[in-house]
């Protein structure tokens, strides 16, 4: 675990973050629900070694940002991420998000399209996509179902559902174990709040979609291919990986991210 050395106080919470501070294209990584910055350790090391400026952080109520002060909501998460970008004076960073972090990053791009240079989403459903009646039913039933799970079993069950490899499952259990059941349910409700169907919406910045071939979380296995088709792009499917594809097969995800980033002009090039 990286000791997130820096602190940004936002509305009752000390958000902890790490910034490599190099002069390359800035990337901001936002983790999934119940997880923390550790899930991006392999991406941080790989991309920082290639000259990118890498920022990782723990959302309020997660990881080292545990003293949340204000409860976790979609609106507060948007405000927190925007505050972090502005605090670091990042020049239109690439937003990278896994699961909840992907929904959050989408929302920031949709609301503030000039704030980001590109968007990379790993294992998340599209916020703007219409939902079928079955999908709406599943979304509505998810929080009550989570509430019925014994608290002691929740980290293990969620980790098994999220990851394929033993290493990724172990880290997911560690991270999920930091939140109480009540906190996890609240974060899930916030994740659902990001979903706002808008069939005519198209992502206004370059978009990369990455999905584990064995991701069985929610409707991601069906929604991400439809999203890619709607946006006119090819999704990257990682064989043998689950919901947390970046931990199940970090090398494949690292290479996919790096290949996409090579298509994005660096800040000094974009200004020419």
Image (cartoon, rainbow, N blue to C red):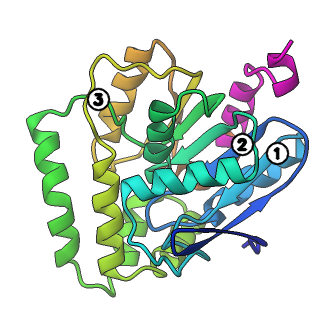
For the point 64% across and 50% down, the residue is: 29
Q: Is residue 114 left or right of residue 106?
A: right
Q: Is residue 214 above or below residue 118?
A: below
Residue 61 visible in image: yes
Disc nearer the start of the sequence (1/3): 1
- Residue under label 2, please give it: 27
- Residue under label 1, please give it: 53
- Residue under label 3, please give it: 129
Q: Is residue 151 above or below residue 95?
A: below
Q: Position of residue 215 (x, y in %)?
A: 40, 46
Residue stretch rendered in magenta on the structure: 253-272
* Dot 2: element: strand
For the point 77% across and 24% down, the residue is: 262
Report, in whole angstroms, how far the alpha carbon at label 1 lies from the one at label 3: 31 Å
Query: Where the C terminus falls, by quadrant?
Result: top right
Secondary structure predominantly adopted by residues drawn in magenta: helix
Q: Is residue 144 left or right of residue 100?
A: left
Residue 123 visible in image: no
Q: Residues within 10 Å of mark 3 (few under 14, many from 20)?
A: some
Disc nearer the start of the sequence (2/1): 2
Query: Where the N terminus falls, by quadrant?
Result: bottom right
Report, in whole angstroms, how far the alpha carbon at label 2 lies from the one at label 1: 6 Å
């Amino acid at each position: 675990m990286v000791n997130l050395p820096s602190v940004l106080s936002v509305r009752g919470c000390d958000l902890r973050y790490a910034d490599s501070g190099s002069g390359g294209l800035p990337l901001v990584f936002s983790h999934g629900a119940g997880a923390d910055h550790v899930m991006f350790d392999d991406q941080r090391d790989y991309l920082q070694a290639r000259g990118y400026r890498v920022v990782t952080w723990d959302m309020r109520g997660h990881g080292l940002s545990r003293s949340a002060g204000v409860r976790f909501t979609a609106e507060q998460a948007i405000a927190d991420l925007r505050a972090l970008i502005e605090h670091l004076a990042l020049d239109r960073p690439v937003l990278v998000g896994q699961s909840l972090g992907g929904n959050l990053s989408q929302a920031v791009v949709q609301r503030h399209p000039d704030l980001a240079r590109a968007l990379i989403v790993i294992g998340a459903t599209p916020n703007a996509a219409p939902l079928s009646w079955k999908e709406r039913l599943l979304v509505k039933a998810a929080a009550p179902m989570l509430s019925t799970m014994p608290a002691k079993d929740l980290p293990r069950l969620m980790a098994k559902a999220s990851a394929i490899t033993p290493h990724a499952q172990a880290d997911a259990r560690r991270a999920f174990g930091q939140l109480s059941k009540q906190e996890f349910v609240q974060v899930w409700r916030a994740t659902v709040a990001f979903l706002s169907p808008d069939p005519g919406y198209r992502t206004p910045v370059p978009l990369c979609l990455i999905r584990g071939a064995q991701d069985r979380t929610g409707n991601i296995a069906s929604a991400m291919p439809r999203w890619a088709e709607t946006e006119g792009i090819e999704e990257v499917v990682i064989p043998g990986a689950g919901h947390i594809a970046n931990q199940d097969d970090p090398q494949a995800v690292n290479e996919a991210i790096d290949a996409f980033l090579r298509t994005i002009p660096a800040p000094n090039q974009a200004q020419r």
